[in-house]
Amino acid sequence: MSNQDTINTAGELSQRVNMKVKYAMDSILIDMVNWIKDNHTHLDGWKNRTHQLENSIKEVLSTFDPSTQSLVGFVTAGPLYALFLEYKPFHWVLSGGMNEFKGKILTLMKERIEAQG
């Protein structure tokens, strides 16, 4: 272990752990956006006519709040009509991705944190 790899304080250790968790969460958000864009047309999502909605779907990278020990990240869709499509019977915009990843997030987080070493 080089001097650069040495952890000097508990705060530094905590910061490194938090960065690993944040990186894992950010990569999951990116995967979720890609899944939504790849699967909306054949899994009862919206029909892509103008590409405006699909192009607006983005991840907002996670933010870690050390005072509450919480990590928050978002997936968003820009146009207002996305809200109406989300609640139209037998359609979805973002909720399909949320449902697809709901049971996998903790497992994916663990795998991605471990992969970082």
Image (spheres, helix red, strand yellow):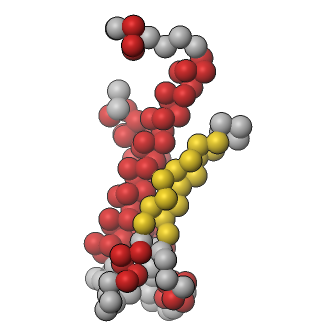
Judge whether 57 appears above or below 105 on screen.
below
Q: Position of residue 5 (x, y in %)?
A: 39, 14
Q: Is residue 21 left or right of residue 51?
A: right
Q: Is residue 104 visible?
A: no
Residue in the image at 48% along x and 65% along y? 75
Q: Position of residue 64 (x, y in %)?
A: 59, 43
Judge whether 72 appears above or below 114 on screen.
below
Q: Which quadrant does the C terminus fall into?
A: top left
Residue in the image at 53% along x and 34% along y? 18
Question: Depth check: 110 or 93 in front?
Answer: 93
Question: Depth check: 57 or 92 in front?
Answer: 57
Q: Which quadrant does the N terminus fall into?
A: top left
Judge whether 77 appears above or below 84 on screen.
above
Q: Position of residue 71 (x, y in %)?
A: 58, 46
Residue in the image at 56% along x and 47% along y? 63
Q: Quadrant of residue 29?
A: bottom left
How many numbered discs sit on the rendered protein?
0
Q: Is residue 63 visible?
A: yes
Residue in the image at 64% along x and 42% along y? 65
Q: Position of residue 97 (x, y in %)?
A: 42, 68
Judge whether 97 appears above or below 113 on screen.
below
Q: Is residue 7 left or right of residue 114?
A: right
